[in-house]
Image: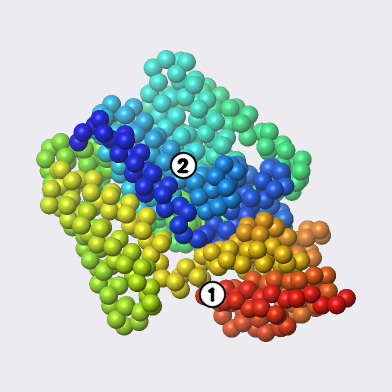
Amino acid sequence: MNLRWTLPVLLLAFGLFYLLPLPFHGLWIPDETRYAQMSQEMLLTGKWAAPHFMGLRYFEKPAAGYWLIAIGQALFGQNLFGVRVASALSLGLSAVLAYWVANRLWGERRKSVICTVLYMSFGLVAGQAGYANLDPQFTLWVNLSLVALWLAIDSRTPRERLLSWGLLGVACGMGFMTKGFLAWVFPVLIALPWMIWQKRFGELLRFGLFGVLVAVLVAAPWALMVNHQESDFWSFFFWHEHIRRFAAEDAQHAQPIWFYLPLLVLSALPWALLLPASARDAWRQHGEPRRVFLLLWLLLPLAFLSLSRGKLPTYILPCMLPLALLLGDTLNTLISQGKTRALRSNALLNGVIGLLGLIALAWLQFKKPVYQDEPLHLSLVTGALLAWMLCNLAAWWRPLRWWAAPAVGMGLVVALLPNALPDKVVNNKTPDRFIADHTEQLRQAGSLMSNDLGAAAALAWHTVRPDITLFATAGETKYGLSYPDAKARLVLFLQGPQWLAEARRQGTVAVVLRIKDHEDDSELTRLQGYSQRFEQGNITILFYSQTPP
């Protein structure tokens, strides 16, 4: 490894695999279109304290995450790159933290580089870098808080210790304003057992209170402002987003308690077969303080998240940095000692996965074609799988020289696959490109309506109009629609023809329907009289001319 070239190579990899792919595939519904629209609305209205979704109160998350996405759109334009760049930069900065804390833990530059490469190439991390949501930002703040915790633990002077606890407080405050109280839970989960074990509980009380004070000072201005503007924000946010999601029987995204264990292994690809060797090292050095800290950082948040009834794959993103540090330590040892068995086995597993992917693709194309008259998409997915296999073949052939080749393979897969998806998936799950083709005509319509929140958000974002009427759908806007000033925004199924007739007397009307089943098809039959109709996938756009008063 030529350490002189590592920083330029890592920056190049960040640009090629994280930033370059951002503008080349449409926004996924419902998440990406929602975050794009909500942050755009902040720019349009200047209401930065209380989040709104298409003009409706939306109190499921605090405001800071939307701020960063809005800043991305303000700097780079209201486009795909502007919407996603906050996620890419957040995980890119987390990679910087991986290098920083690895260097502080071990003081070995090569090991720090290895940890950074592993973190950047984890499938979950690299995939989320190109996806607009709040988890990458929240992960950055959690990572910063726990890096600051180690700096505080490892500090050599009172001034350094105080600054580290202050940095932890800033990170907790920003994490709280991004996703809530969980930002304070993770540092406490790790600091409390560590300080008790090290017999430094008094230090935790003294300096921990300072960190809490800093976190409160960071979050207090926004917290007071949102309470002043929307007095019921905290009631909904605390009970619905924290208590109900964690413990309620009907919690959203409910999954079994073991859900995250296999997911953690999958998320560790393309380094999954280093896990046994790393676990063996952890067992052999179970009393070594640095390793204990990293294990607490990995396992306690994972256990806490597993206890929650509501689970999504991206919730374990904060666990990936300590995993990269543990695996990086193991990989560095294997390279230093010239041991290749685990490296070859890992590369072989990755190669088999790629081969199985190619076989499955060929079988599906023969039996029930996934790609129909899509030579470019088929070539891209085939090329991505072949590149993955070739990179891992190199790692298997010369594991000590080409140990980083699996990282290149993952980068190519993550960069190419979103643009290699079949039209059926693209048209159904990323409808904003189809809506963009009709943006000018949609903007001229006097009234806009949609029966799907994801499509409605894409419609609002492209037309720069939050005033979308919802047809026979409420979903996560149910709370916002319960306010008296928002009731007119929802049109029930039986009210569709009446609303359409009244809206047409006031001007032209455009309706975007997402027709997923026979029930949605019945909505189309109630909205007759359109002058133009366009379809792509399960998205239908209807235009209605104005009728005389």
Question: What type is the residue that disc 2 sits on?
Answer: Leu
For the residue pair 161 and 410, the one nearer the viewer reads as 410
Above or below, 474 relative to 269: below
Q: Which of 273/37 is in front?
A: 37
What SS does tag 2 mark?
Answer: helix
Disc 1, SS: strand
What is the image's colouring?
rainbow
Q: Quadrant of the N terminus?
A: top left
Number of on-image labels: 2
**Where on the picture, by quarter, is residue 530?**
bottom right
Picture residue at 72% right of the left edge, 47% below the top? 45
Q: Which numbered disc covers residue 536?
A: 1
Q: Position of residue 191 (x, y in %)?
A: 45, 33
Residue identified by numbered label 2: 89
Rendered residue at 70%/58% (across/down) = 465
Name the residue: 35% across, 79% down.
369
Q: Is residue 359 left or right of residue 495?
A: left
Q: Quadrant of residue 502?
A: bottom right
State whether residue 520 appears in this view. yes
Position of residue 483 relative to residue 6, above or below, is below
Amino acid bearing label 1: Gln
Residue 35 % position (x, y): 58, 53
Residue at image x 39%, y 17%? 156
For marks 1 and 2, the one nearer the N-term is 2
Q: CA distance from mark 1 to mark 2?
A: 33 Å
Q: Nearer the viewer, mark 1 or mark 2?
A: 1
Query: Is mark 1 in CB contact (under 8 Å) with mark 2?
Result: no
Q: Nearer the viewer, residue 17 or 289?
A: 17
Out of 124 and 405, give the one closest to the viewer.
Answer: 405
Work out whether residue 182 can be spotted: no
Find residue 380 and report its image quarter.
bottom left
Per the rendering, the mark at residue 60 is none
